C-alpha cells in the first residue's frame, strides 16, 4: 500500500476520511457520557474536586504508558490498524461498566480502563493518518480528522442535552437516572465506530525515510528540536488541567447541568469549524505561528474563566466556551502535523507515543494541582495558574523552536 493513497475524498485520502468518521462516532459516544461525568461524581457520588482531578489525571496519565508502548509497537510491527482497533474496542467495552459505579474508587477504575483504550489507539491512529497522507497535505489531513472528531462531539452534546432535559428538565443537580440513560444510549455509536474501523480502514505503509535521512538514522534517536518541543509541551500541559474543571467552574457560578451541555455546543461547533481551515493554513504559513497563537487564545480563555462571576455568567460563559473552541481548532491538528514534520516516517508511531506520553504525564500533575488550588485557594486560582503556564510555553516555543 502506498504511503498516500491516490484516491481522495474531500481533499483527504480514503483512510483519513474513514478514520474521521470513526472519530465522529466515538466522540458522539464519549461526549454524551463524559461531559456529565464530573457532575455525576460531584452530585451523585459526592466526590470532591481534588479527587475528581485525581480520577481524570490518573486515567489519562496511566494510559500514557500505553500510548508510548503502542506507538513503539506499531513501528516495530509496521502495522497500525490492529492496535488502533483494539484501543477503540477497549474504550467501548468499558463504558457500560459506568452503570455499576457506586463510589469514587470504582469510578476511578472504570475511567482508567476506558482511558487505557485511548492510550492503545492514539499513537498508532495518528501514525496511520500521517502514513496515509502526503507531506504537503499533512495539516489538512489532521485538520479534517479533528474537525470530524469535534463534529461528533457536537452531535453527542446535543443528544445528551436532550436526554438530560427529558429526564430532569432544568434541575440544578444531575440525577442518577439522567447519567444512566446517557451511558445506555452512548454505547451505540461507540460500537458502530469499531465496526466501521474493522471493515473500511486498511494499513498504509510509511514508505521511504524523509529526505536526507538514511534508514539507520531513522532508527536512531530523535533530534534536539523534537526533544525541546516535548519539554515545552510538558510545560504547557502543566497548566492545561482536564476540561472537567471548566464544567465544574460553570456549575460553580450557577449553571444547571442541561444549560452547561448547551454551553458546550458553541465550543464544539467552533472547534469543528476551525480545525480544517487552521490545518490548511498551517500547510501554507507554517505550524509555529498557528500554535503560538492558539496558546495565546488558551491563556485569554483561562483568564476569562478565572474572572467569571455569577452576575453575568450566561452570555460570558457562552463566549468563553466559544473562544476555547478556537484554541482547540487551531492547536490540536496543527500540533500533531508538526510532530509528523519533525520525525522520520518510520518512527512516527514512537514519536506520537512520546508526544502523547509527554501530555499525559504532565496532565496527571496538572489535574492534581488544579484540584488542590480549587479547594485550598479558590476556583479562580486554578485558571490563573493555567493561563500563566500557557504564556510561559508560548515564550519557550517562540524562542527555542525553529520551523
Image (cartoon, helix red, strand yellow):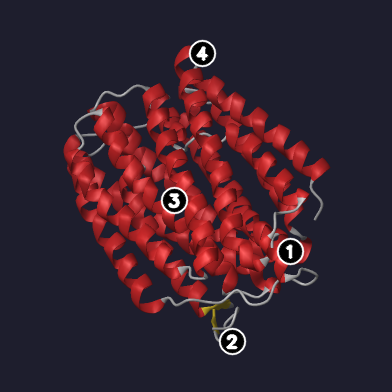
Instruction: Check the picture and name the quadrant holding the C terminus.
Output: bottom right
- CA separation in Å, label 4 and label 1: 50 Å
- CA separation in Å, label 4 and label 2: 56 Å
- CA separation in Å, label 3 and label 4: 33 Å
Q: Residues within 10 Å of mark 1 (few under 14, many from 20)?
A: few
Which is closer to the viewer, label 4 or label 1? 1
- The residue furthest top is 376
Query: Nearer the N terminus, badge 3 or badge 1?
Result: 3
Q: Position of residue 120 (x, y in %)?
A: 42, 55
Task: Locate residue 198: give its quadrant.
Answer: bottom left
Task: Locate residue 155: give its quadrant.
Answer: bottom left
Residue tagged by mark 2?
Answer: 6
Residue tagged by mark 4?
Answer: 377
Query: Nearer the N terminus, badge 2 or badge 1?
Result: 2
Identify which residue is drawn at 38% across, 58% down: 87
For this view, does 226 lie left or right of residue 21?
Answer: right
Q: Residues within 10 Å of mark 3 (few under 14, many from 20)?
A: many
Q: Position of residue 206 (x, y in %)?
A: 60, 74
Query: Nearer the N terminus, badge 4 or badge 2?
Result: 2
Identify which residue is drawn at 69% across, 49% down: 291
> Is there any visible trace of residue 167 in the rendered image?
yes
> Is there any visible trace of residue 277 in the rendered image?
no
Q: Position of residue 332 (x, y in %)?
A: 58, 53
Residue tagged by mark 1?
Answer: 217
Residue 119's label in the rendered image is 3
Instruction: Look at the numbered disc 3 and give the secondary structure of its residue.
Output: helix
- CA separation in Å, label 2 and label 3: 30 Å
Amino acid at each position: 500500500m502506498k504511503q498516500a493513497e491516490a484516491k481522495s475524498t474531500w481533499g483527504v485520502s480514503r483512510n483519513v476520511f474513514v478514520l474521521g468518521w470513526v472519530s465522529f462516532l466515538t466522540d458522539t459516544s464519549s461526549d454524551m457520557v463524559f461531559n456529565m461525568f464530573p457532575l455525576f461524581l460531584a452530585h451523585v457520588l459526592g466526590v470532591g474536586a481534588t479527587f475528581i482531578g485525581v480520577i481524570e489525571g490518573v486515567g489519562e496519565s496511566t494510559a500514557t504508558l500505553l500510548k508510548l508502548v503502542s506507538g513503539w509497537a506499531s513501528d516495530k510491527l509496521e502495522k497500525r490498524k490492529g492496535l488502533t482497533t483494539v484501543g477503540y474496542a477497549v474504550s467501548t467495552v468499558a463504558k457500560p461498566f459506568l452503570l455499576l459505579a457506586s463510589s469514587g474508587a470504582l469510578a476511578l477504575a472504570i475511567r482508567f480502563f476506558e482511558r487505557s483504550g485511548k492510550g492503545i489507539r492514539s499513537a498508532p491512529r495518528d501514525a496511520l493518518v500521517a502514513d496515509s497522507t502526503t507531506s504537503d497535505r499533512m495539516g489538512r489531513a489532521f485538520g479534517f480528522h479533528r474537525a470530524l472528531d469535534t463534529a461528533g462531539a457536537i452531535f453527542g452534546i446535543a443528544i445528551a442535552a436532550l436526554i438530560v432535559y427529558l429526564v430532569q428538565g432544568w434541575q440544578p443537580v444531575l440525577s442518577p437516572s439522567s447519567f444512566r440513560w446517557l451511558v445506555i444510549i452512548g454505547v451505540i455509536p461507540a460500537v458502530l465506530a469499531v465496526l466501521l474501523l474493522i471493515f473500511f480502514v486498511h494499513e498504509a505503509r510509511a514508505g521511504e525515510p524523509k529526505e536526507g535521512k538514511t534508514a539507520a538514522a531513522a532508527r536512531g534517536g530523535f533530534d534536539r528540536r523534537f526533544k525541546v518541543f516535548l519539554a515545552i509541551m510538558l510545560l504547557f500541559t502543566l497548566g492545561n488541567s482536564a476540561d472537567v474543571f471548566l464544567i465544574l467552574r460553570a456549575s460553580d457560578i450557577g449553571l444547571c447541568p442541561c444549560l452547561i451541555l448547551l454551553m458546550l455546543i458553541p465550543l464544539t461547533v467552533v472547534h469543528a469549524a476551525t480545525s480544517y481551515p487552521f490545518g490548511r493554513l498551517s500547510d501554507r504559513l507554517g505550524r509555529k505561528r498557528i500554535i503560538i497563537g492558539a496558546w495565546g487564545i488558551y491563556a485569554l480563555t483561562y483568564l476569562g474563566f478565572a474572572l467569571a462571576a455569577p452576575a453575568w455568567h450566561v452570555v460570558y460563559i457562552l463566549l468563553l466556551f466559544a473562544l476555547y473552541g478556537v484554541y482547540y481548532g487551531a492547536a490540536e491538528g496543527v500540533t500533531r502535523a508538526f510532530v509528523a514534520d519533525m520525525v522520520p516516517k518510520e518512527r512516527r508511531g514512537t514519536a506520537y507515543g512520546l508526544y502523547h506520553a509527554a501530555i499525559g504525564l504532565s496532565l496527571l500533575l496538572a489535574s492534581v494541582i488544579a484540584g488542590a488550588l480549587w479547594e485550598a485557594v479558590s476556583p479562580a486560582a486554578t485558571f490563573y495558574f493555567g493561563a500563566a503556564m500557557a504564556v510561559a510555553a508560548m515564550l519557550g516555543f517562540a524562542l527555542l523552536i525553529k520551523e
